[in-house]
Amino acid sequence: MTKITSRTEDFSRWYTDVIRRAELADYSPVKGCMVIRPYGYAIWELIQQGLDRRIKATGHVNAYFPLLIPQSLLTKEADHVEGFAPQVAWVTRGGTEELEEPLAIRPTSEAIIGTMYAKWIQSWRDLPVLINQWANIVRWEKVTRLFLRTTEFLWQEGHTAHETAEEAEEETLKILGLYKEFVETELAMPVIAGRKSDSEKFAGASRTYSIEALMGDGRALQAATSHNLGQNFAKAFGIQFQARDKSLQHIWGTSWGITTRLIGAVIMMHGDDNGLVFPPRIAPHQVVIVPIPRGNWRETVLPHAKAIFDELTAQGVRVMLDDRDAYTPGWKFAEWELRGVPVRLEIGPKDIEKGQVMLARRDTREKLSASREGLAARIVDLLAEIQRSLFDRAVTFREEHTSEAASYDEFKQILEGRPGFVIAPWCGSVECENQIKADTQATLRNLPLEDSAGGVCVRCGQPGVARAHFAKAY
RNA sequence: CGGGGCGUAGCGCAGCCUGGUAGCGCGCCUGCCUUGGGCGCAGGAGGUCCGCGGUUCGAAUCCGCGCGCCCCGACCA
């Protein structure tokens, strides 16, 4: 049987092995582009549902803008062009005709959406505009990895326009909080919410915020970003409105996104040497029922399995009944563990006799018997317990892999040893940030919101503007 | 851009040095038997050996050129 590489032996090979063996995704003939297979896409759909519900609950609506962006629009905001120029794919021909103006395949949609907002917004009464779009985008990456960095990927991008600077900042932080709550609740993934340094901020933004998660190998991963665009795009695209005081003003903008990269984060955060471990809330199958075949089991065992299937389905549990003849129970156990199903339910002649079933938790690999009576409620509770337990485990892991550094020597020493977050005061200068990266390969992940300034910069000894989270990152 | 490695069945690889009718494991198909932690047995399908050219009676194997992929370094962000 094809074995997957262990996590400690080679984390990045474990990662690709698991994705391919579990059939989440596959490489495609197009360099840097992957195929998201049904089992992987099911997770994306669950992420979409959970996030879309929250986005709408905060007053946003969905729309769809074109894939192609005229070159002249993309180049209107100076920092934006400069930041994205190396990564843009261009369409230069339509059929047999050379285009007069090249069309960019969107690397992000600020330009096209800003252009439309300029047409739609006239008055302060039109504000705020709160639009989200689910879309695909293309960024010409040199080095790609399944889910984490691919040439084409799927995401949600919110684009809003506001009357005042304060309102835009409030929106930016509201979404950051929404992302944090979503990721922690649904993906059982604890994150640090904070502000990005100037050198790491989005091309064209005034301020960028992110949520950062710590993966199983101790490297950090940016799980989402929320940008306060100030009036940069408003000025570049002429998005103006007449204010309450009759003056003509530029809107204040925000943009924010979450991508299919999140699936990679779930894999790396919860997985183990036996394969995937999905938090119940985003698991395509929350329970798999494996009937134990004995004699004429299709008459004796299967009806019981089907009855349980129906009961669980009625409780809103996503169930899979694996009644395939071709595979043995042992094979199915291993297979569904590899695929990360949170709970396995075994039912055979012995169980039926005793009026019980066997349950196995994927997270702890613990087996327990459960009474047939009140089974559905028991499983609903168990799923909630697993969700909670995965989150707690991840928090503990992060705490164990977070250190504070008082001196630069100590800082470097920590990063040479065990990977993880290192918290240290920082003076705010790009020089120190760059030097730290050159010396340790660690980047400034973000400046946590709840953390205040204090101490002196771990590198240069100047007064610190903030306590920063540093880590080697994906 | 520099250095190294690789390209043979769906996947992972052996064969190449020393040229002589293309193999192994997994997977796949058929049947029987099993089934409570990746069962067993029997039979079977599946190949432009990356491409082009050369040497040779004969090339997966030797030589030349090309293409593609991977790793390390540099560069870029």
Image (spheres, rainbow, N blue to C red):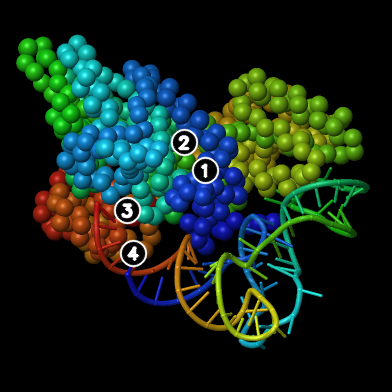
* A401 or A293, nearer to the observer: A293
Position of residue A128 measured from the top left corner of the image (x, y, whole percent): 23, 18
Can residue A402 be seen at all in this image of the molecule? no
- Looking at the image, is mark 1 or mark 2 nearer the viewer? 1
Position of residue A468 measured from the top left corner of the image (x, y, whole percent): 24, 48
Q: CA distance from mark 2 to mark 3?
A: 22 Å
Q: Name which residue lies at 36% across and 54% down.
A: A142
Q: Name which residue lies at 42% across and 24% down.
A: A52
Indicate which disc, 3 or 1, sits on the residue closer to the N terminus: 1
Q: Name which residue lies at 67% across and 46% down.
A: A335
Residue at label 4?
A: A416
Q: Name which residue lies at 20% across and 17% down.
A: A121
Kind of element beneath mark 4: helix
Where is the N terminus of chain A found, in terms of image quarters? Answer: bottom right
Name the amino acid, label 3.
Ala
Residue at label 2?
A: A187
Kind of element beneath mark 1: strand
Indicate which disc, 1 or 2, sits on the residue closer to the N terminus: 1
